[in-house]
Image: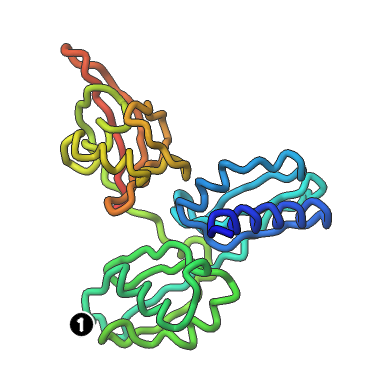
């Protein structure tokens, strides 16, 4: 059985378990491709609602919660956040997302147990399955050549807030290909291959149409480039071009 079919079978099993037992069930962290497959499935015959969350607003990697109609309590995703910080910032390496992820996976942890990793100047915030917290805190002591410490974030006000850069400009129209070109400061034509090859996701769903018209609040993720939130069309120019505002995640 192909990987995609196995994934579909697993999601349907979780939905049925939620329905027949009247409990909440959760997936592991899902990447954008898996979220897209999930969106294509119908759960109408199992009587469950599927909700996605990744530990913070606009997270890319998210868990799916399967909520039975019989369940009336608030979903409590098994997601935790740990902060990894250098023991001595003065002598630490400049660490990237790849460095943090590589060190974590080298411990033998499956990628599906790790959510987003937000890198900041003084370290990184790692979202993970709650079952991984103690292991990560005990085992992560070095990233590349930099000695580090890991600690769990327990207060909501300590959680990271993704940084965003406001970008504004004029485009021919609020079509996907035009706005992506503005977001990543490149030509519209150079982004068409990303769209047609299935590397562009809007709100977790794959979009392969260049002519998709973006709506206010849409989250656009482009594999290998980054992501942004489309804000609005603010006005029209004399040449009938659209002035738009969007927020690119740093």
Identify whether 144 is placed above or below 8: below
SS under mark 1: helix
User: Residue 99: x and y, percent?
Assistant: 30, 74
Q: Residue at x 38, y 87 (%)?
A: 141
Q: What scheme was used to colour the molecule? A: rainbow
Dot 1, crowdedness within 10 Å: few (<14), some or many (≥20)?
few
Q: Quadrant of residue 126?
A: bottom left
Foreground residue, 35 or 88?
A: 35
Q: Quadrant of residue 14?
A: bottom right
List the residue tagged with mark 1. Answer: 90
Identify whether 13 is placed above or below 239: below
Identify whether 182 is placed above or below 57: above
User: Residue 230: x and y, percent?
Assistant: 35, 35
Q: Residue at x 37, y 26 (%)?
A: 213
Q: Which of the image's four quarters has the N terminus?
A: bottom right
User: Residue 10: x and y, percent?
Assistant: 65, 58
């Amino acid at each position: 059985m192909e990987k995609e079919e196995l994934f579909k079978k697993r999601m349907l099993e979780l939905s049925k378990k939620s329905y027949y037992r009247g409990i909440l069930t959760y997936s592991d962290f899902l990447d954008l491709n898996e979220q897209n497959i999930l969106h294509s499935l119908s759960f109408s015959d199992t009587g469950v609602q599927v909700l996605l969350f990744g530990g913070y607003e606009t997270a890319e990697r998210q868990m799916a919660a399967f909520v039975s109609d019989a369940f009336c309590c608030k979903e409590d995703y098994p997601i935790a956040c740990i902060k990894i910080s250098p023991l001595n910032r003065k002598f630490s390496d400049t660490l990237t997302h790849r460095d943090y992820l590589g060190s974590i996976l080298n411990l033998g942890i499956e990628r599906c147990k790790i959510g987003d990793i937000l890198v900041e100047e003084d370290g990184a915030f790692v979202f993970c399955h709650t079952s991984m917290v103690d292991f990560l805190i005990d085992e992560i002591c070095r990233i590349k050549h930099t000695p580090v410490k890991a600690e769990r974030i327990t207060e909501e006000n300590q959680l990271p807030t993704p940084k965003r850069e406001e970008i504004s400009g004029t485009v021919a129209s609020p079509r996907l290909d035009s706005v992506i070109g503005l977001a990543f400061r490149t030509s519209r034509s150079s982004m068409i291959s990303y769209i047609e090859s299935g590397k562009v996701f809007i709100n977790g769903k794959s979009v392969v149409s260049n002519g998709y018209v973006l709506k206010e609040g849409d989250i656009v993720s482009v594999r290998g480039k980054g992501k942004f939130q489309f804000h609005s069309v603010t006005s029209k120019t004399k040449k009938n071009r659209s002035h738009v505002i969007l927020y690119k995640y740093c």
